[in-house]
Structures are given as C-alpha cells and as structure tokens.
Amino acid sequence: MIWSMFKKEMTDAFRDKRTMLLTFLIPVAMLTALVFFYESMLSDNSNTTYTVAIPHELSEEGEQFFAELPTLKPNVTENAKQAVEEGEATVAFLSEEAFFDTVTENQVSNVTLYGDSTSENASTVMSLIENQLNTLEDSIVSSRLANNNLNDSVLEAIQIERQQLSYNDNNGASTMILAMFLPMIFAISIASGGMPVSADILAGEKERKTMEALLMTPVSRKKILVSKWFTISTIGFLSGITALIIVVIETFFFTENLKDALGFGEQLPLILMVVLCTTILFSLFIGALQLLVSLVSKTVKESNNYGSPIIMLTVFPVFLIMSKGVNEFTFTDYITPFMNMFVLLKEMLLGVLDPVAIFLTLGSTALYMLIAFVIAQILFMKDKWVL
C-alpha cells in the first residue's frame, strides 16, 4: 500500500513540469556558473596585463626591472596617485627619480606602492613588484657583503621550511575549494529540490481542503505519512545526485585545475559507496524536516516561509569548517546535524577515510532523521495539525 501511495505522490509531483524543471534546472545552472568561477580563480592569468603608474621616466635599470615582469606595463604620468584613483592604472610605483641608479649604493632606498588593497588585481600587482624588489634587494645585499669580504650566511641564522600534511601535498588550492564547494552545493540541491514538493504535499492538501477526503480512505495515517516522506526525500535525493553528477562531469571535462583534486585512486569505490549512503540518509533527514514543516503549516506560502531556514542551515556549516583542518575535527563535529555531513565529505575529498567518522556521521544522521519523523508522526495522528 505504501508503494502505491508513493507512486501516486511521485506522479503528482512530476505532473507539474514547470516546478520540476525549475527544481532541477536552476540549481544546476547556478552550480555550473560556480564551477567555472572557481576554475577562473585557479587559472593562470599570465596573459593579463596590468598598468603601473610611475611619476618619472625610467632609467635603463628601471626598464630592465619591469622587463622581467611581462604582465606589468609601466606608464609615465605626472600624477601617479591620481591615475590610480581614476582607474587608469592599477598601482602607482612611487620612488625617487634616480631610484634604480642609486639603489646599488650603500644606503637605504624607499619605495611606496599606492593602490587599493581590497582589489584582487592591485594585490596581485603589489605582490609581483614586492617579490621582484626582494630579489633585487638580495642581489644588492650579496654584492655589498662581497665587497666587504663577508659571506651571505652571516645574515641567515635560521632556515625555515614548511611541509604540508600528506593529504594536502599536491593540488592544495583545488582540493580546498572543492572541499568547501561540493558539500555546499550538494546540501543546497537536496534541500531546495524537496522544498516545492514538501510545501504542497501536506500544507497544500490542507489549503485545498482535500486532506479530510484522503484520511477517509482505508489507508492508515502512518502509511500516508511514510509515502509523503519518501516522496519528498526522493525528489531531494534526485536533485542532489543530479547536481553532484553534473558538477563532477563539468569539473572533469571542462576544467584544468579543479579536476586535479578529484584523483581518488583505489579509494574511489569506497568513497562512492559512502557518498551514496550519505546522500540517502541526508535526503531522508531533510525530507523529514520538510515534512514536519509542511505539517504544521496551514498554507503553501506559510510552508515555504517556515522551510526557508532549512536551506540556510545547509549553508551555514561551510563557514564553521572553512578554517579547520582535517586533524582538528572532534567528536562534536561528527554528530552535529548538517555539519557532520560537511565534515565527512571534506575529509573524503582530501583523501581521508576514517571509519569512526563515517560511522558517527551516518549513525547520528539516521538518529536525527528518525526523531524528526517520529515527531511528524505524532502530530499527524492529531486532527488539530492535519485538518
């Protein structure tokens, strides 16, 4: 009987083709745009040229300095600061007129880089110039030491080397972006996919005054509720899986940098199995919450208003785990609803498969799912909430 009710609810859900199209199409379009946006962030912008305003003509040494920075184009202007403020240049290089001629002398030369530090382009240009100036400074210091019969080692007492954890040796930037991006779009797709159906499946029945006729059928209330729960969860599951598959395909075939983070090797079958279990349980959990929201709502509009925070909750964990490393996650992170799914997916994207983390995440999600459904079932048995 549950199967028959489930097929009926699914048929009704897919009958509204416009809603279904928007349910699947809009998230996919947004995710596609995000994929290419993040890819552009990681792409090499070596072909982009930035203008640097300087207040005076460059000497031969100055021209040689900027010649080693092919992405920077020096532009002589009377008021370099004004050129930056008016958008004619990205950064102003302010120094003494004979800076490149006198910098090799035994004195300290000053350079001011004028620009908007909140601008990504300005920050990039400043970093390029600073790195080049540091290289020039090292060369000058070495020359000065040699002239005084001193070795470079007198200036270096400690040498520091940074080493990343093994899971973050290669493709660190790509991996970290996907570790934040994929769980977020996965959760949003599941929640937004089931929301239109959940708003109509109980609140819509009450608004249309058809709930009483449904309850008069020989089907028990529990079976009616289960079939509606499965319908919401199935739509959410299909939305999440569709979005995930499309994003992975786009990442593999249409990106150069992001796809490097998806090389799981021999761990791929196990990761796919865990992702599938996580998707099913998370869809059922979100479906139970949306079922509960629809049950306490009297109209479709009211249900949509009450259900909006659920979508917000699927985004919030990103900001909590963004600055955390895999070795910093605790027991609380694995059992906190919503966050545990983000933590588990982030670990797997970084190549870490912890059986304890998997068990705690899946087990706690199943527990929260059952609690939400039991509360919905208790309310559904009372006419006060149904009619």
Image (tube, rainbow, N blue to C red):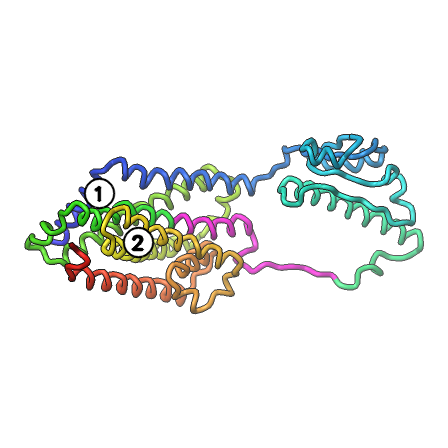
Quarter location, residue 159: bottom right
- On screen, residue 197 versus residue 42, left or right, reads left
The spot of residue 238 in percent (x, y) is 29, 46
Which residue is disc 1 drawn over? 13
Tell me the amino acid under the disc marked 2.
Ser
Front in this rendered view, residue 15 or 84: 84
Which residue is disc 2 drawn over? 283
Q: Check the image and report above or below for 378 versus 123.
A: below
Disc with the residue nearer the chain's start (1 vs 2): 1
Quarter location, residue 123: top right
Tell me the amino acid under the disc marked 1.
Ala
Examine the structure image and report whether residue 168 is included in the region drawn in magenta. Answer: yes
Q: Which label sits in the foreground, 1 or 2?
A: 1
Q: What is the quadrant of the C terminus in the image?
A: bottom left
In the structure shown, which secondary structural element does the residue marked by tag 2 occupy?
Answer: helix
Rate crowding at label 1 as few (under 14), some (14 to 19) or many (20 or more) other CA atoms within 10 Å.
Answer: many
User: How far separated are the C-alphas under marks 1 and 2?
Assistant: 17 Å
Quarter location, residue 24: top left
Examine the structure image and report whether residue 167 is included in the region drawn in magenta. Answer: yes
Main secondary structure type of the part rendered in magenta: helix
Q: Magenta segment, which residues? A: 159-187
Rate crowding at label 2 as few (under 14), some (14 to 19) or many (20 or more) other CA atoms within 10 Å.
Answer: many
Q: Tell me, yes or no, whether the two marked residues, 1 and 2, touch with CB atoms within 8 Å.
A: no
Residue 82 circle label: none
The spot of residue 361 in percent (x, y) is 37, 63
Front in this rendered view, residue 51 or 198: 198
**Could you tell me which residue is drawn at 18 percent across and 53 percent down?**
227
In the structure shown, which secondary structural element does the residue marked by tag 1 occupy?
Answer: helix
**Could you tell me which residue is drawn at 90 percent across and 42 percent down?**
102
Q: Check the image and report above or below for 63 versus 299.
A: above
**Could you tell me which residue is drawn at 27 percent across and 39 percent down?**
20
